Image (tube, rainbow, N blue to C red):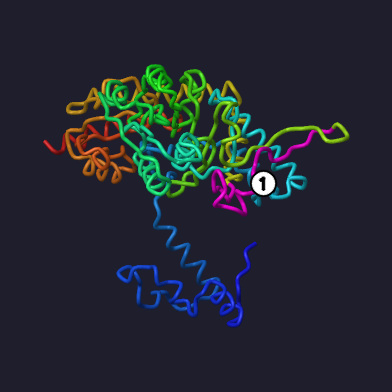
Amino acid sequence: MSYVPNTPAEQQAMLRAIGATTIEDVLKPIPDAVRLKRPLDLPAALRETDVRRLLTSMAEDNADLDHYISFLGAGSYDHIQPSIVPHLVKRAEFYTSYTPYQPEFSQGMLQATYEFQTMVCQITGMDVANASLYDGSTAVVEAALMAVGAGGRGEVLVSRALDPQYRATLRTYAHTRGFTVREIGLERGVTSASELRAALNADTKAVIIQQPNFFGALEDVHAIEQATHATKALFVVAITEPASLGAIQPPGAYGADIVAAEGMSLGSPIGYGGPALGLFATRTEFVRRMPGRIVGKTLDDRGQIGYALTLQTREQHIRRERATSNICTNQELLAIFTTVYLSALGKQGFAELGAQCLRKAHYAQQAICALDGFKPAFDRPFYDEFAITCPIPVERLNAELRDRGMIGGYDLSRDYPELENAALFCVTEARTRDDIDTLVSALEEIVGATK
């Protein structure tokens, strides 16, 4: 636990140690234009019971998925959470999980992490997985950093069909780490094969695509893998919807070098877009370059099974400037969500999850496109998300749907200006046929009222 100086003498000693006289000396680098220059606008202190009452009233203003039928995806997906998941995760030994600095006293947590890593390898088809990455976007960043290596130079090619937030996060890190990011354009909703081949060169360190991509479309991953490996670059596959791995080929089957994914779909609840969990898996030959933590299984001197942190350098905790990666917190609680969830589903249940999402999404897409004025934005195979061109602005359409107790599709024009009046709808196993039919009827009614 970090020590916080409390007395004025301690605070002055700390300031002197860094060559400062007052706290203002420390704050000088902050531009004057962004300084607050006034006290914080906070209310007077309240009694504990009054604080609880105030926060409860504020929370009641929030909308939640118990009161809305959601057809929104775009990185966060509404899946059914079996009741066994929160009941087991909330056990005290899991709920207080943190970084296992003393692994010999954390055998239960380490075993759970080991099982988590094993399951990630099984669903991705990769050789080795780690734990403790923050979310899907930073997992993609870690994949790029691993590809460019300690020198931090080179170029990373990124499909424009990669989640826009992932691309923004990657550009932020690239700016300070020294490598460049070049985006590859799209053809009919997927990565342009011709543009990718033209961009590949000896300076390319990695190619990053998303499967299924941000539009829900399936990329020609075999062609991309062949073109990438022809130049010795690493092939990175990002996944925002890991439930898809129950229905389509895992990245290990088509030659991926690194898989960087968002694990929220696998048992975690959705609240304000989170909490998130980064999944990261790779091939054995890259294991010593992996970020995060890896738990290994071994035998002690009495022949009993034991678990230990493997291939983790202490620099990740105390010498950040020397670290391969600076992941210094722990997403273990979310990893436990994933482990319990996948254990509850089992191999057959996970395949059924993938199949249900696939079937229901295709039923919804066909029903919507049968309406006057609605048509597919792209004629491509898809999983549980699909882009639809709408006859009225998406913002207006979604406002009307909210009034009817539904959350509509993601307005694609926010990130892709060329896709005006295009919405990205998502249908998971949580949606029933009645839910879908209700959406279709509402869309028909809304558009009909505008004529």
Name which residue type carries label 1.
Answer: Phe
Q: Quadrant of residue 424?
A: top left
The reply to whether the magenta stretch includes residue 306 is: yes
**Left-right relation of 364 to 27:** left
Label 1 sits on residue: 94
Q: How many marks?
A: 1
Point 66% across, 38% down: residue: 311
Residue 67 image offset from top left, x and y in percent: 41, 45
Residue range of the region highlighted in magenta in the rendering: 304-330
Question: How many C-alpha atoms fall within 10 Å of the one at disc 1: few (<14), some, or many (≥20)?
Answer: some
In the rendered image, the quadrant that contains the C terminus is top left
Is residue 68 depicted above or below 370 in this figure?
Answer: below
Q: Is residue 451 above or below residue 173?
A: above
The secondary element bearing badge 1 is classed as helix
Which image quadrant for residue 5?
Answer: bottom right
Q: Which residue is depicted at the point 35% across and 38% down? A: 181
Most foreground residue, 56 or 76: 76
Compare residues 299 and 336 and report the one nearer the observer.
299
Side (left or right) of 399 relative to 270: left
The residue sitting at the bottom extreme is: 9
Give 193 or 135, whichever is nearer the viewer: 193
Q: Can residue 28 be found in the magenta stretch?
A: no
- Residue 59, given in percent of the width and then of the height, sits at 44, 58
Q: Position of residue 382 (x, y in %)?
A: 36, 23
Instruction: Tell me the quadrant of the picture where the N terminus can be found.
Output: bottom right
Query: Image quarter for residue 222?
Result: top left
Task: Identify the residue at the far left of this view.
Answer: 451
As drawn, 131 above or below 440 = below
The one nearer the camera, 436 or 254, is 254
Residue 217: give x, y in percent of width and height: 34, 25
